[in-house]
Every structure is written in C-alpha cells, then in structure tokens.
Image (cartoon, rainbow, N blue to C red):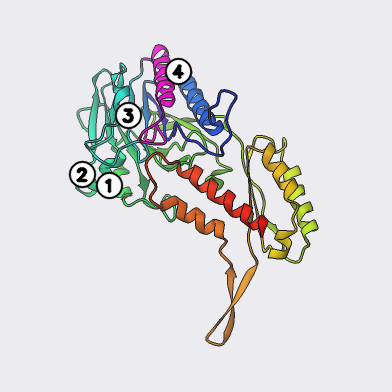
Amino acid sequence: MRVVHISDPHLGYRAYNRVTPAGINVREADVFNAFRAALRRTAEIAPDLIVIAGDLFHVVRPSNLTIQHTFREFLSLRQKSNAPIVIIGGNHDSPRSVDTGCILDLYAHLPGVYVAHTEYVQIPLKDLDTSVFCLCHRALPQLSSLKIEPDPSSKYNVLVAHGTVEGIVRNAYDLVEISRSQVLSDGWDYIAFGHYHVFEKLADNAYYSGSLEYTSTSIWGEASQPKGFVEYDLDQRSLLQFHEIETREVIDLRPIDASGITAAELDRAIEQRIMAIKGGWKNKIIRLVVQNVPRSVQADLDYAAIRRIRSEALHFELQLRPPQVVRRDDHLLRDAGPARPLEAEWEEFAKTCQIAPGIDREHLAALGREYLLKQAAAE
C-alpha cells in the first residue's frame, strides 16, 4: 500500500511583476508547472492513495484561470489513476468564516476526490480498508479538545494535518502549534504534514513533504532545499522516495562585508559574486546582502550595472545594510550590533500586517523593498 503525499502547491501565487508571452505572471506559471509535474510523476508512480496536505491554492479566491487549469489537471490525473485523492484545507485556501463558500468544494465533485476544510473528520476508504483523518487548518483552534487516534477497524490509518508542529521552526507566527504528543504516534501508518515548506522527517512514519515551489514569504532560508513530494510505503512503514521537482533556481549569495572599501571596490565585489553564479544569473531569483555600507559608498555605487542585472535576472534583491553603530548607555560605550535596516523592518511588518482580500502579500513585500532601494539610490 503506497501513498503519495503532496503539500502546499500554492496555485495562483504571484511575484516580481514579470509575465510570460501569454500574459501570465512568471512565478504563477512556475508554480503551476511544478504542480503539473508532480501530478504527472504521481500518475507514473501509480500509488494506491494520494493526499494533498493543504494550501492547494495561494488565496481563498483564486482566479478563474487558476481554478480552470487546476480542474483540468485533476481530470487528467483521474484518467491515468484510480487512486483516491484526499485534499485538506490550509490557512491560505480556507475562508475564515464557516458560512463562506470554499473553492476546494468544487473538486469534491470529481470522482474519487474527497475534501475537508472545516472540521477534523474521518474519511473511510472501504475499497482500500483505509481511514484518512483530516486535521485541516481551521480545526486547529479546537485541537486540545480533539481525540486524535487511529480507527482500529481499519487496516491502514493515515493522518493528514496542516499546521506547525511544535519545535519544527523558530519564531512561528501561528496562533496554534500542533503538539507532538497529540499527533505523533506509532498507531498511525503514516502522518502527512503540510504548512512548513521544507521536506522534513519528524518520525519514521511522519513527514513534511514541503512545498512544490518557493512560495513562502521569505524564500532565502529555503534556497538550498529541494522541492518535491513524498512516496511512502504503509506496509513497510518506510519512505520510498522524495521525488524532487524542477523549480526556478533561487540563489542566496554569500554576503559581502563592505567595511573600509570604496564604492568602486564594492562594485567589483558585487560583479564578482554575480559572475560566479553557475550557469549565469539570467532568469534566476537572487539575493545578495552587503553589510556595513556607509551612505557615502552607497550613494556612489554603479546603479546602472545593478539595473542591468535586475533586467536579466527574474529577481535580483540587493540588500545594502548600514554599518554597526555604537550606543552610549550609563556612561559606558558598548557595541549595539548591526543597525536594523529598513528593508528588514519592512519585511517583518509585511509578513504579519492585515491586508485587504485579494492583495498578494509577497507582491506587497517586493514592492516595498523596491521602493526602499530606489530611495536609497536617490539619497
């Protein structure tokens, strides 16, 4: 009995204001291509069960084009595979209000597709002698009162959950964390987690599969992590394979320390970092952090060269951070560490601030960074 575990496709995700010849946002197309590749590989694997552990869509109200293309991909998969598909709601694609319709319900009309996005529910799959328990994101506030345990009458029991398991990530912004003691148990044949975008093993029978593309609010911490999905054997209780999916290349370059160097020397250092990128920088997503940059040096940089790089890369984020500052406190001088750059303040604010429905948070954050860099260049 084999299960394919996919999570966090984030279909409809957009960033960087670049479009394809067809007029579709480039990153939106990247994300959908990764999803299509995952489903095609799944059909080749021919598993007995397919689970999607939340955030199928990036927003509660995806575009008509995204809805239509997703429907077609599921129809195509259904023509190649009879495996039941269980989809749970994540924080991105589940409405906050119970009485608001959820787009995920549309896909429950496809044969063999089961959807859960409001409560903790058990989905019995009699032909497989299997029960799939769905702990969707909307059910997490009631977590302490839920009895999460396998069904002894089923041969196989699978738990699918969308949320942050305690200890998996630092400084999580989730209001509710999933207690390890409540969900991690040898009684489950497999536990499929979603929400954390990096492939991670929690136990021999429990994994985060990670997202299919780089779609989190800060992708740089994931730059070295592969994207893909899990294939797991319930009988052997073993990971068969993590199937990597080809994605847009994301590169977080080694930082530069600009202490004591001139603008011309910093220009050369930036150029060297960019030129050293294997395969070139064109159409890639790149970040370069430069520390300890005085305003005088920042003002004299070759911004024409920086603009050329930006025009050829899909996205080039150059973070120019000011020098360390020394603060006087109680007549004692002490090193206060690096001054917090405005772009870092903005990044943190953009992750958590309330925004109007339909606004792309990543696009908002990118615009803010762009305005800050333009202002720095003007100064």
As displayed, is residue 86 above or below residue 277?
above
Query: What amino acid is found at the position of numbered circle 2 in the picture?
Result: Leu
In the image, what residue type sits under mark 1? Gln
Mark toward the viewer: 4 or 1: 4
Q: Specify the farthest residue to the bottom.
A: 331
Q: Nearer the viewer, mark 3 or mark 4?
A: 3
Residue that numbered label 1 is attached to: 182
Residue at point 44% right, 31% down? 11
Q: Cα distance, mark 2 to mark 4?
A: 35 Å
What numbered label is drawn on residue 146? 2
The amino acid at mark 4 is: Ala
* N-terminal label among 3 and 4: 4
**Residue 352, percent from left and from top:** 41, 52
Q: Which residue is mark 3?
A: 103
Q: Give x and y (percent) for residue 116.
A: 27, 31
Q: Which residues are magenta?
A: 53-82
Residue drawn at 68 percent across, 64 percent down? 295
Residue where numbered disc 4 is placed:
43
Whole-angstrom CA distance, mark 3 to mark 4, is 24 Å
Badge 2: how crowded within 10 Å, few (<14), some, or many (20+)? few
Q: Earlier in the sequence, mark 4 or mark 1?
A: 4
